[in-house]
Image: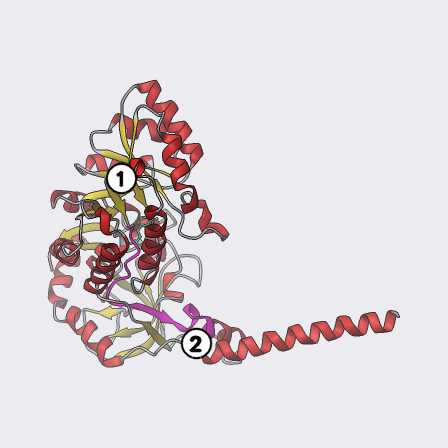
Amino acid sequence: MNDSGSGSKSNGKDRDLKALSEKALHLISDHPSYMDEEYLRAFVGRYTEKAGLFRDLVRDHGSPLYLLDESGLKNKLSRFREAFSILPGTPDIYYAVKSNNMPEIAGILAGEGAGLDVSSGRELDLALRAGAQKIFFSGPGKTDSELSDAVRNSGRVTLLIDSFGELDRLDRVTRGINIPIKAGVRLTTAEDGLWRKFGIPLKRLEEFFRKAEPARQIQLEGIQFHTSWNLNPDAQTAFISRLGEVLRQMPLSILGQIRFIDIGGGYWPEQGEWLRAEGTSSGALRNILSAEGTDTKSKYMLESSPIEVFAKRISETLESELPEMTGLRICMEPGRWLCHDNMHLLMKVIDLKTPDIAITDAGTNAIGWERFEHDYFPVINISDPGLEEHTFNILGSLCTPHDVWGYSFFGKSIAPGDILLIPTQGAYTYSLRQEFIKALPRTVVTSI
Ligand SMILES: Cc1ncc(COP(=O)(O)O)c(C=O)c1O
């Protein structure tokens, strides 16, 4: 009996191993498309053309630098507005401050009439200082003191309530201060798993509106949802369809209260997602198994839809799924789509350690995470510009070998004192920067 028991156990293990190795084989062969090298060179060329301008900025302001392109940022906002002007309702844009919390970005966008989307008391403070006239305060876990701050600024702030518990607390806070506030409710887009931590389930929407009725100071008048990392509009349109189904069953007394639908952010920049092997499932697995170690050369690209495609598909879906609600304000919370292209990093080579290692004056604490081990971006030597890419380890000055800017550079040569540019680093870098060993770069705002 014992024998047959251990036999069936080992059979089970064999089956598991077989299933795993089949999955591994499938994974390994299923990698995204390789990066088009011509496209990459054209991208790099757009920056090498302006090498003189970047060198002048470092001469005048020192190194390292965060470089914010003001006109680029304004152009992006206009293009986003233009694209979404086809919506059936009135489009209303709120820049998601978390994607890059540089005060200058909030100031420029608020100056152009955009709203700001904030997720904490700190971000609320930043948005108020930036002069934003329209602020959405969203996110789970708002403290009572954050709720009070929002209520005290209710002329400018709409609070996006995240849970039934938060509704109770907001009711208490508003009664205490005796000030009314406009509000919406966030819906979760995935009822399973940890994304549940955001918002309430769609099936409890009516219950939420009913529960909010006695809350005298809360003017509940909108709905918010957000899906992340959308290379195309499929996730957004799928959720709008689900929402449409629920709203069609909703009593008119509740429907009549809804003045805005906030469809969130998550629009992937048009550049697409640029990955190293380590950033893909197949490459990460190969890296573990390969006798040659980590593949630092392969580059992959996941394409993303232009914003006009997002706008068209979202607009069509809103029209077909919510036809009776055309007077609504349609709000959006783009973050990375606006800031990604418009902040660049500039740094200097301090030391050529060996014939294949350059150390820079900046450390990756300037971006807060080991981004370049997973994501590919070109490192461009603007002191000796060229369109050839050379294998070379470009490393920061922190106390970790994970302090990597890249495994290659574009240019003719590389030497101490050279100025390096890593373009399009606007999203989820500056906000994540860390006080660690090296001073953080200074910020320069200009138009390039
Ligand atoms: C509620 C909400 N809105 C907007 C955004 C911005 O997303 P993105 O920068 O991808 O556009 C986020 C990002 O996490 C978010 O959580």
Left/right placement of residue 159 relative to residue 203 reads left
List the residue tagged with mark 2: 295
The picture places residue 107, in percent across and down from the top left corner, at 17, 43
Binning the other alpha carbons within 10 Å of mark 2 as few (below 14), some (14 to 19) or many (20 upward) gives some
Binning the other alpha carbons within 10 Å of mark 1 as few (below 14), some (14 to 19) or many (20 upward) gives some
In percent of the image, x 41 and y 28: which residue is there? Answer: 168
The picture places residue 300, in percent across and down from the top left corner, at 35, 75
Left/right placement of residue 157 relative to residue 119 reads left
351, 403: nearer the viewer: 403
Mark 1 or 2: the one toward you: 1
Left/right placement of residue 324 relative to residue 394 reads left
442, 321: nearer the viewer: 321
Per the image, label 1 sits on a secondary structure element best described as loop
Per the model, the C-alpha gap separating discs 1 and 2 is 52 Å
Query: Can residue 438 be seen from the camera position used here?
Result: no
Residue labelled 2 has its Cβ within 8 Å of some atom of ligand 1: no
Quarter placement of the N terminus = bottom right
Per the image, label 2 sits on a secondary structure element best described as loop
Point out the stretch of residues depicted in magenta: 264-283
